[in-house]
Image (spheres, grey):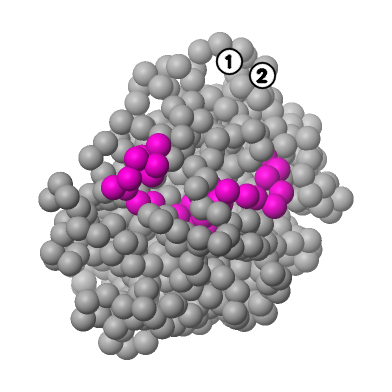
Amino acid sequence: MPFDGVKHRIGVLALQGAVSEHADMLSVLGADVSLVRTPAQLDGLDGLVMPGGESTAIARLAAPMGLLRAIRARLDGGDFGVLGTCAGLILLSDDIAEPGALAGFDRVGGLDVLVERNGYGGQLASFEADVECAAEDFEVGTIPASTPSRVAFIRAPIIRRVGAGVRVVATHQGNPVAVASGRIVAAAYHPEITGDLALHRYFLRTLGVSSSV
Amino acid sequence: MSTTAPANSTNTNPSTHPAAPEGNATTIVENHDLVPANRLNTGLAKMLKGGVIMDVVNAEQAKIAEDAGAVAVMALERVPADIRAQGGVARMSDPDLIDGIIEAVSIPVMAKARIGHFVEAQVLEALGVDYIDESEVLSPADYIHHINKREFSVPFVCGATNLGEALRRITEGAAMIRSKGEAGTGDVSEAMKHIRTIKAQIARLTSLSEDELYVEAKELQAPYELVKQVARDGKLPVVLFVAGGVATPADAAMMMQLGADGVFVGSGIFKSGNPEQRARAIVHATTHFNDPAEIAKASRGLGEAMVGINVADLPAPHRLAERGR
């Protein structure tokens, strides 16, 4: 069933990470899904999901083709949205507390937040949690907002500062864990590990009705 | 704004899985029958998919691996080729070296423990590694029992040469499986045999009827419920990497084309002529595994590969894959 009667064409950045999990969720929501490894594969897409993985690896794999810059160009060009989770959030953020091995590599940017990588610590600090979603953002058609959402934080980043134009759309213990700004939606957590569809559904809604459909 | 790390309430209980509320239309509930470890631990392995995990013996090598685009590093005392050359008992790394590696990189740090050596595993967990490899590359501490991995919060990866072995390790709590291959040889033929065997055995399971699955579970020496789950899904319930003998970009790409989720490279990098460049090349070929032109590009000018040993020339007692079935 196409989402809201619109079949969005959504790419999943497929350099490394939880690619198939996001592709499966988008398919469940009726999107037309393709995998993106080159800038040319962004053509004709309404949006892109940047999945979790290792941000340092993804930045390096994207570099030879200028893929992250190409994603930013599509964002700036309008009619295109990006959903980033975990590593995706890091690569969308304007500021990173300690860039470490990310220093000197292109990122997408465009999201006015400061993130701290591995903010909670290593894998032993990973956890599942119910996050509180801003109900009005996650309310979709006749489907009630899923508040709270059960999600996984795996070696997750922490959002340390949220810029003026950025809206917090989900919180955990009062702290922001998912944000939105313009056509960017980004979360520190993994909805694809628990299979919670709320964030993807919200992302597709921010894309609105595609003029080309 | 400050965020405090929450209590690790879920990860300390590997045997339970929070079920989605019934009738929650917004959630895909995965069909978990005999779930391996927990979602956080199998989940971390999913974040490594499509990537290369590199053996390192110190912080300097770990930095080189991270700079080359590795998704994780594997800490061990000596790389397999040196263990072969030098002989003796191979054990867990020195904790100081592991601390140094954790300090040096932001990617996950894995570390090897001997098969059955549950106290080495306890030590590695206490050091805060992100994954433990209960590995045949080190000298086994127990020739009968593997570590009861369900007693740990930290995830484990284990080697397997066939489906039965993989399922036994998952039953014990492994959250990720890799082929054993024949480590330290630079000969990819054993890894090839193992991934082909596992894939073929899974494909066969999907064609069997329920009564045949009971017999198959007996043959595989694995729990029926897990065998049934693999037959239904057509894949393992955990991520499957390839390890053992991968030495070139083409080796890595071949494993990906055969359906591996990712690649471990051991001696292949740091026993070669130009580790930095070879590491980058293997990462590139793993990403673009379906693009021969890109693999060709990655294969140029790498200098000397590690000196190889044909597995067929190895006397049986020196074959690591035979350890721990």
| Residue B157, quarter of the rendered image | bottom right
Magenta stretch: give its range.
A73-101
Please say whether residue B242 is visible from this viewpoint.
no
Tell me which amino acid carries mark 1: Leu
The percent coordinates of residue A6 (x first, y second) are: 16, 59
The percent coordinates of residue A142 (x first, y second) are: 21, 81
B269 w.r.t. A97: above or below: above
The percent coordinates of residue B235 (x first, y second) are: 33, 57
Q: Earlier in the sequence, mark 2 or mark 1?
A: 2
In the image, A27: left or right of A149?
left
Query: Which class describes the residues within 10 Å of circle 2: few (<14), some (14-19), or many (20+)?
Result: some
Residue ranking furthest to the bottom: B22
Q: Are marks 2 and 1 in contact (CB under 8 Å)?
A: yes
In the image, B21: left or right of B182?
left
Residue in view at x 46 percent, y 35 percent: A69
| Closest to the observer, B199 or B38 | B38
Asked if the stretch drawn in magenta spans residue A75, the answer is yes
Q: Quick check: do tags 2 and 1 share a chain?
A: yes
